[in-house]
Amino acid sequence: MPEILRFIIVAGLALVVGAAIVYILQRPHVEAIHKAAQAEAERLREEARAEAKDILLKAKDEAQKERDQADREIKRMRLELQHEEERLIRRREDLDRRLEKLEQRDQVLNKRQSALDKRLNELERLESARLAELERIAQLDREQAKQMLLEAVEADSRQEMAAVIRQVEEETKAEADRIARELITMAIQRVASDQVSEVAVSVVPLPNDEMKGRIIGRNGRNIRTFEQAAGVDVIVDDTPEAVTLSSFDPVRREVARRAMTKLILDGRIHPSRIEKSVEDARQEVEQVIREEGERAVYETGVTGLHPEIIKLLGRLKFRTSYGQNQLQHAIEVAHLAGIIAAELGADVQVAKAGALLHDLGKAVDHEVEGTHAMIAAEICQRYGVNPKVINCIASHHHEVAQESLEAVIVEAADAISGARPGARREALETYLKRVKALEDIANSFPGVAQSYALQAGREVRIVVMPEQVDDLAAIRLAKDIAKKVEESIEYPGQIKVTVIRETRAVDYAK
């Protein structure tokens, strides 16, 4: 242990002595490095001082420039503020002068108002005194005098009022007629369809009179079989080379006509052959009905209809009204309604569909009770037709209220198609009844002296008693008669009602 301690002490002394020797040997070198470092630091310090001086000079220059610019801006703003202050002072002086003038004008107006109030009070006093004097002289109070004056004015102006009403009405009608004529003319020109007066064919020509016997058959068996199979009456009379087929159903009559024509051409007429010919003709007619219905739908551009509706539409091919073919009439009305609806901005498809189907009930009105319009509406409702289209159908004869512009268009197109010359014809007896009914309706009104139905029943002229009907009442009478005609009579087209009132002064020179 003491040896180790001694070893450590000796080693420590050796390290100390070594360090002292190294320090003594390296001291001159360290001092040289220290001096070099001090010289370098002094040089850097001098450069920093020079650079700081340059930066300071530049900063002073920049600060002086900014100060000069700020001074100039302050001077400019001071000048502007000075000008603005001067302008405000002038404006304030101007406002003070105006205010002074307004005060002076207000004083003048107050004086005038006071003078006017005094004059108004004086006038009211004088007016009261004048009215009191007038009431004393006339022995009437104010209300009585006013009533008498109103009666006098009413009596004097009644004629003038009637003239003004008539003038306004005539101008309105003239303008409406002009626009309506242009619209209807354009619609008819664009449709331009041929219309031929038609009747259902019920006479079948024969090659010779001997064929009549073959049609009747032994003991009448052939004619009985034909009538039973076709559902028509066969009339064999003295008409040369022709037989007549009679039936209330136009489809049955067409089936019978086709079957009879085939039998006559074939020459083999017996019960079994008759039944086969009738069945073949029925199938042909059914095919024609489908094709005609599809043609009508395609031609008018109406889509989405149920096949049963299309089939009923085709049956109109064999129906006529006043000699006008109902299918052609429906197609024409659809075209007219579509054109008018397009011009007026209405729904073209609804107007076309309502017009095409408006007479659909005539295909079955002999089988179902009710008017053709309501029957058609019920059928269309059953097959899911648009409610607006159904209203167009049901209301085209005013049996229900019209709920849309399209319904009015369908009614107008129906009237155009049926009323134009050559479109329809009617029996003489029906025509005479309608003309007499027109005159009877006109004569039923008080004050009517005479009435005349003119232009094939399309106009009725009424001559009134001038002492009972004045001008204003004449206008009202024309409207009342037209309304009653609409409610009482069925007619194609429209009927013009003209009321004539004249006063004659007669004297004699003696």
Image (spheres, helix red, strand yellow):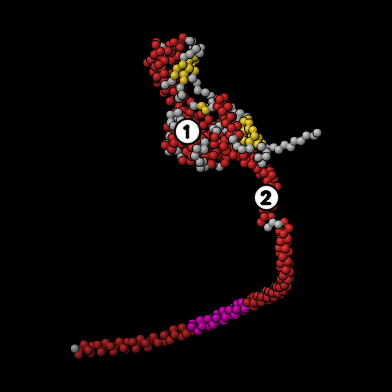
Q: Position of residue 206 (x, y in %)?
A: 48, 13
Residue at 19 percent of width and 88 percent of height: 1
Which residues are drawn in magenta?
40-67
Left or right: 333 as drawn, with respect to 502: left
**Residue type beneath disc 2:** Glu
Query: Which secondary structure class fits the magenta region best?
Result: helix
Q: In the rendered image, is residue 401 in sight? A: yes
Q: Nearer the viewer, mark 2 or mark 1?
A: 2
Please say if 164 is above or below 4: above
**Residue type beneath disc 1:** Thr
The single residue placed furthest to the right in the displayed view is: 510
Residue at 52 percent of width and 34 percent of height: 334
Quadrant assignment for the C terminus: top right
Q: Is disc 2 placed on a helix, strand or loop?
A: helix
Residue 371, labelled with which disc? 1
Q: Nearer the viewer, residue 504 or 392?
A: 504
Alpha-carbon neighbours of circle 1 within 10 Å: few (<14), some, or many (≥20)? some
Q: Please state the total of marks drawn on the protein image.
A: 2
Please say if 367 is above or below 51: above
The single residue placed furthest to the top in the displayed view is: 210
Cα gap from disc 2 to disc 1, whole angstroms:
52 Å
Residue at 35 percent of width and 86 percent of height: 22
Q: Nearer the viewer, residue 408 or 468?
A: 468
The residue that disc 2 covers is: 151
Q: Nearer the viewer, residue 61 or 73?
A: 73
Q: Is residue 150 magenta?
A: no
Question: Which mark is first along the chain, 1 or 2?
Answer: 2
Residue 28, labelled with which disc? none
Q: Is residue 66 magenta?
A: yes
